[in-house]
Image: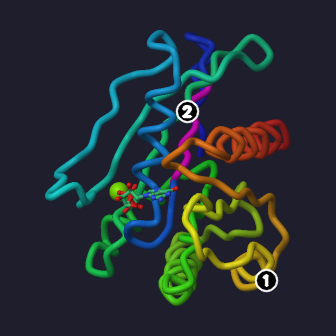
């Protein structure tokens, strides 16, 4: 549901980082914020955070260059991961042009990843959206930690549809921009189609 402003020659897209609590969604946004030139980014906003955990969302507007003479603005959002914030998650998903599912690579988070993915699927369906149609990318985060699950294992559990997926460490920045770029590419491709 990208918003195209023909007068200002701007395309506005919404990208949502989804995933279980503490998988590294906010850390992704912080890394992007810190490694983007001042003129290309707006203010990063974290709403109602308490002891460092997002209660509603994080928001970061970004300019990602031009497409056919149109300035492209990306609005990055994260969702709260905790079970009881499902209403917020639904709200934030509304009108998403692209989705990034951030998985936590730690073996003990296997169940949390699957639950979050199921929750994403259900929430999309409720809004007549689907992973088959919305541009969608997976990130296996925290690869810098020792004893992470093998990528093949994560992939077979979480990426049954074979979408683009990336190993990352939001803490070091490895894979962070690759994930975002792949998503924006899919978003542009879908904009062209529609
Ligand atoms: N080692 C490591 N820790 C990470 C990584 N990404 C996030 N974390 C840590 O995991 C915790 C939760 O991260 P946060 O971004 O707040 O998770 P969110 O709930 O998904 O927003 C924080 O302590 C982060 O520093 C990563 O790639 N590697
Ligand atoms: Mg967060």
Work out whether 72 lies above or below 28. above
Overall secondary structure of the magenta stretch? Answer: strand
Query: In this figure, what is the number of numbered marks?
Result: 2
- Tell me if 58 is positioned left or right of 96 in this view: left
The CA span between labels 2 and 1 is 30 Å
| Position of residue 135 measured from the top left corner of the image (x, y, whole percent) | 72, 55
- In the rendered structure, find residue 142 and report the number of the disc placed on it: none
Examine the structure image and report whether residue 101 is included in the region drawn in magenta.
Answer: no
Disc 1 element: helix
Residue placed farthest to the bottom in the image? Answer: 111
* Quadrant of res 140: bottom right
Work out whether 9 lies above or below 30. above
Q: Dots 2 and 1: beta carbons under 8 Å?
A: no
Disc 2 element: strand
Q: Nearer the viewer, residue 1 or 58?
A: 58
Residue at mark 1: 156
| Position of residue 129 measured from the top left corner of the image (x, y, whole percent) | 62, 67
Residue at mark 2: 74
| Position of residue 56 measured from the top left corner of the image (x, y, whole percent) | 27, 57
* Quadrant of res 43: top left
Q: Earlier in the sequence, mark 2 or mark 1?
A: 2
From the Cβ of disc 1, is ligand 1 less than 8 Å away? no
| Position of residue 81 measured from the top left corner of the image (x, y, whole percent) | 37, 70
């Amino acid at each position: 549901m990208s918003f195209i402003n023909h007068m200002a020659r701007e395309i506005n897209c919404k990208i949502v980082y989804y995933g279980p609590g503490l998988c590294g969604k906010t850390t992704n946004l912080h890394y992007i914020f810190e490694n983007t030139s001042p003129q290309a980014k707006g203010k990063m906003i974290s709403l109602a955070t308490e002891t460092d955990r997002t209660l509603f969302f994080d928001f970061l507007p970004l300019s990602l260059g031009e497409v056919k003479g149109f300035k492209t603005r990306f609005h990055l959002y994260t969702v709260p991961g905790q079970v009881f914030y499902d209403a917020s998650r639904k709200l934030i998903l509304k009108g998403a042009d692209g989705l990034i599912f951030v998985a936590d690579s730690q073996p003990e988070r296997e169940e949390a990843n699957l639950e979050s993915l199921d929750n994403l699927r259900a929430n999309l369906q409720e809004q007549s959206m689907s992973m088959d149609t919305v541009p969608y990318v997976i990130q296996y985060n925290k690869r810098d930690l020792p004893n992470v699950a093998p990528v093949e294992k994560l992939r077979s559990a979480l990426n049954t549809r074979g979408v683009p997926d990336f190993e990352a460490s939001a803490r070091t920045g490895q894979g962070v921009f690759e994930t975002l770029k792949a998503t924006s590419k899919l978003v542009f491709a879908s904009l062209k189609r529609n």
